[in-house]
Amino acid sequence: MYRDIVKGTSKATLYKFYDPHGIIAWLLERGTPIEDVVKVFKDALVGIMRVEGNVFLNEGINFIWQAITGASGLTYFGSNSCIGVGDGTTSEDPSQTGLMGQNKYYKQVDSGYPQVSGTQATFQATFGPNEANFNWQEWTIANGCSDSAVNLNRKVSSLGSKPSGATWTLKVAVTIS
């Protein structure tokens, strides 16, 4: 017997670099693969964090259905895609429409993203030495760089406090199965 079960999951990886001059940020934003940057700048790599899980937001699910049914006037993800980070600690809830914190920063995804393979879409954004320098407690994927854009999902997880002079790259793989 078959059961209809649809599941959405995510796996996020945060790469933290010491990068006071922004060289690493510049390379990543222009599409240099993160694996290549890690190899070349291994001494600048401060750490890697992995976080699983997220909540798909109702507005993101509604957007998916509108896209499937051919609704007009949609601003698609793709080149409009952004990852937002903030300091909000309010638990994820499907009714939310963006980041909940007081400090928040949205960044357009790096060149070459998003990438789609099978049932998975991967988004990656790089936050340079002078961007989003606050305590990262939440993240979202949106089709624009603000809370007023359609936010696909939201995750609350303590990722650390990003200092000035650091470049952090957040790579998020979202799977619907």
Image (spheres, rainbow, N blue to C red):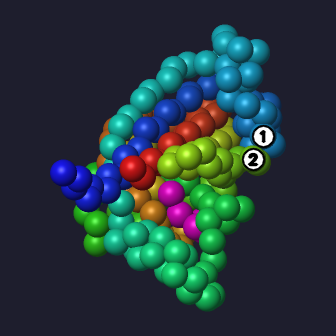
- Is 96 placed above or below 161 here? below
Instruction: Give the labeled residue for mark 1.
Output: 31
Q: Residues within 10 Å of mark 2 (few under 14, many from 20)?
A: some
**Which residue is pictured at 60% across the width and 37% down the height?**
169
Instruction: Give the labeled residue for mark 2.
Output: 112
- Is 41 placed above or below 164 here? above
Q: Which residues are magenta?
A: 141-145
Give amino acid for label 1.
Answer: Gly
Whether 17 is among the magenta residues is: no
Residue 131 visible from this viewpoint: no
- Determine whether label 1 and label 2 are within 8 Å by CB: yes
Give amino acid for label 2.
Answer: Gly
* Cα–Cα span, label 1 and label 2: 6 Å
Label 1 residue SS: loop
- In this rendering, the count of numbered labels is 2
Query: Which of the 4 image quadrants contains residue 95?
Result: bottom left
Q: Position of residue 129 (x, y in %)?
A: 66, 38
Q: Nearer the viewer, residue 87 or 31?
A: 31
